[in-house]
Image (cartoon, rainbow, N blue to C red):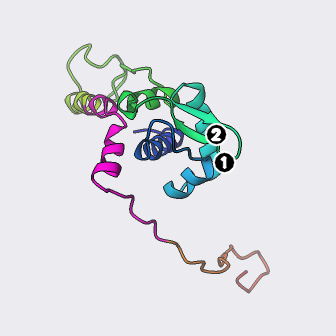
C-alpha cells in the first residue's frame, strides 16, 4: 500500500501522537527509532521532511526534540501518504491496456474500485487514535523480539573448475 518513507513517517507520528501533551514532551530521532525498532538516521531524515511539511516542530538544544505541530486529531494518514507517495491516479486497466471503465469492465474492475475506496477511507484516519489508545486505554506496542547473534554466516559458493572443497 505504501513505501518505507511513509511507513516510517506513520511510525514517527504515531509515537509523537501517543505522547501528545501540547508540546511539553519532546522526543529526538534516536528515542523514536528505539521505540519503533527503526534506524535513527532514517527517522531523522523523515522527521526533517515532516517538519518541512508542517506536521512536526523541531527544537534544538539539550532539551530539544520533536513534537506534533498540532493536535493529532488534525493530522491524517492522507497527509503523510500524500507527502511521500505518488498520488496520480492511474486509469489504465490492468487487464490489457486502455482506460479502465471505458468499455466492458475487466474481471478485476469492481475489486480494484473497492480496494481504492477502502484505502481512501483508511487514509482519512487521524493520529488521535494513537493518543487515545496510549493515554486512555494503556495500549503499548508489543516488544520486538531480539534476534540472537548467530555468529558468522556460512557462505556457500559454486566450486571453481579445480576446487574440491566447499568455501
Name the residue rendered at 21%, 22% in the picture. 105
Q: Position of residue 65 (x, y in %)?
A: 61, 42
Name the residue rendered at 70%, 47% in the picture. 62
Q: Is residue 140 magenta?
A: yes
Residue that badge 2 annotates: 45
Q: Which residues are magenta?
A: 118-145
Q: Position of residue 52 (x, y in %)?
A: 60, 26
Tell whether label 1 touches label 2 (CB within 8 Å).
yes
In the displayed structure, 102 sits above or below 139; it is: above
Q: Which mark is residue 41?
A: 1
Q: Which mark is residue 112?
A: none
Element under disc 2:
helix
Name the residue rendered at 54%, 50% in the picture. 32
Quarter of the picture holding the C terminus: bottom right
Quadrant hosting residue 76: top left
Element under disc 1:
helix
Q: Is residue 139 magenta?
A: yes
Quadrant hosting residue 81: top left
Q: In screen coordinates, is 132 left or right of 5?
A: left
* View extreme (top): residue: 102
Amino acid at each position: 500500500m505504501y513505501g518505507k518513507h511513509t511507513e516510517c513517517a506513520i511510525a514517527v507520528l504515531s509515537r509523537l501522537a501517543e505522547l501528545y501533551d501540547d508540546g511539553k514532551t519532546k522526543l529526538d530521532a534516536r528515542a523514536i527509532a528505539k521505540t519503533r525498532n527503526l534506524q535513527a538516521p532514517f527517522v531523522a531524515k523523515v522527521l526533517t521532511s515532516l517538519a518541512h511539511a508542517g506536521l512536526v516542530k523541531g527544537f534544538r538544544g539539550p532539551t530539544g526534540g520533536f513534537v506534533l505541530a498540532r493536535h493529532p486529531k488534525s493530522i491524517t494518514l492522507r497527509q503523510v501518504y500524500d507527502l511521500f507517495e505518488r498520488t496520480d491516479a492511474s486509469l489504465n486497466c490492468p487487464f490489457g491496456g486502455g482506460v479502465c471503465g471505458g468499455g466492458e469492465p475487466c474481471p478485476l474492475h469492481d475489486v480494484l474500485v473497492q480496494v481504492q475506496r477502502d484505502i481512501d477511507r483508511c487514509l482519512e484516519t487521524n493520529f488521535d487514535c494513537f493518543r487515545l489508545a496510549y493515554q486512555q486505554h494503556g495500549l503499548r506496542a508489543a516488544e520486538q523480539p531480539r534476534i540472537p547473534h548467530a555468529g558468522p554466516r556460512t557462505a556457500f559458493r559454486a566450486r571453481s573448475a579445480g576446487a574440491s572443497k566447499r568455501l
